Image (cartoon, rainbow, N blue to C red):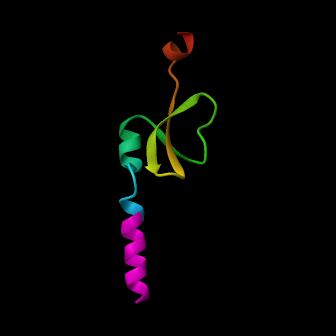
Amino acid sequence: MRILWFILIFISLTTHGNAHGPDSCNHEGGLCRVGNCIPGEYLVSYCFEPIILCCKSLSLTTIKS
């Protein structure tokens, strides 16, 4: 019975919300971060919603605009 709960929790975590995972984040040029993006980065998506964020650096053109 414990293995069944483990499987259900695992499936729930892997299919939760619109989380795309670290591969998708890296493909978009971002990094997975826990909690908050650091200054100079913005939220692109989620690696594992809602705790691990996919953050991407602000480009120099965005900062100058």
Residue 38 sits inside the magenta stretch: no
Q: Horizontal and vertical percent for residue 24?
A: 36, 44
Question: Magenta segment range?
Answer: 1-12
Depth check: 60 or 13 in front?
13
Q: Horizontal and vertical percent for residue 61?
A: 49, 13
Q: Which residue is found at the position 51% from the left and 45% from the top?
A: 53
Residue 5 sits inside the magenta stretch: yes
Image height of 46 relative to 9, above or below: above
Depth check: 1 or 62 in front?
1
Q: Which residue is found at the position 40% from the left and 57% from the top?
A: 16
Image height of 43 relative to 24, above or below: above
The chief SS type of the magenta part is: helix
Residue 61 left/right relative to 19:
right
Q: Horizontal and vertical percent for residue 31?
A: 49, 41
Which residue sits furthest bottom?
Answer: 1
Number of numbered markers: 0
Residue 40 quadrant: top right
Residue 4 left/right relative to 61:
left
